[in-house]
Image (tube, rainbow, N blue to C red):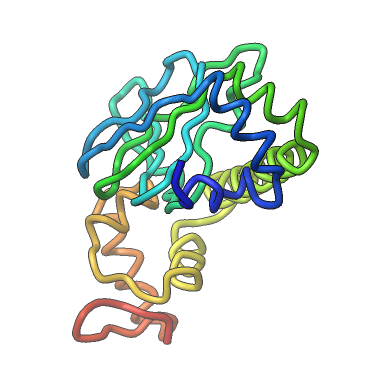
Amino acid sequence: MGYEIYDAPLFQGCDRAVASSIFEKSPGRFTTYRKGDFIAMQNSVCRSLFILCRGSVYAQMTNAEGREFTLDTLSAPDVLASAFLFGTENILPVTIVANSDCEVWVVSKECVRSLIEQDRAILHNFLAVLSDHSLFLSRRLEQFALQTLSSRLIGYLENNHAIQNLQETAFILGVTRPSLSRAIAQLVRQGVIRKMDNGYALA
């Protein structure tokens, strides 16, 4: 295993001798993906933990009408699908797509169980990852359930500083490009957003 593995949030502060002993019995597998490849599919059974060692991915949901919504973008090192691994109904509610060339280490559910049972640091890290992801999801839900598109757009700019690609931003916000363009134009007229040579930013 390379340093990328122990850089992952799940392994910070762990006893590497204990972890290595478990990995010798259940080593998992490294998989590489090209940008645009599907890493895991929505509604599939979640039997493994995905540890993103290199690159970035995005998680998207698709409804019955085929409308797609980008829930989150994650960059290495990070842990994917942690919230669904030990659920009573461990179905993955999102599709995970490579946003760039990626390296992913796939660890079995049984291996993860051994790790959190035998190393207290990994247990604490796993609980922290679950809590952080749950907090993010609750905030994301609040954005879409309670906020207007204008409010979501302002929040997006506060976090990302600029909009340079309207189509990509519309995809992330789960709206059509015309709807995003209208919201931007309204906020520009109100003086909330300013137009730049390469996009838009908060005024």
Q: Quadrant of residue 41?
A: top left
> x, y (%) of residue 50?
47, 33
In the image shown, does 8 or 189 lie closer to the viewer? 8
Q: Quadrant of residue 11?
A: top right
Up/down of 74 relative to 51, above or below: below
Residue depicted at x 64% and y 44%: 138
In the image shown, does 12 or 176 lie closer to the viewer? 12
- Count all numbered tags in the image, as a single digit: 0
In the image shown, does 161 or 189 lie closer to the viewer? 161
Q: Residue furthest right?
A: 120
In the image shown, does 173 or 183 lie closer to the viewer? 173
> x, y (%) of residue 4?
46, 50
Residue depicted at x 44% and y 57%: 149
Up/down of 147 relative to 155, above or below: above
Residue depicted at x 39% and y 75%: 187
> x, y (%) of residue 145?
57, 44
For the C terminus, the image quarter is bottom left
Up/down of 201 relative to 136, above or below: below
Residue depicted at x 56% and y 19%: 25
Up/down of 96 relative to 139, above or below: above
> x, y (%) of residue 201?
37, 80
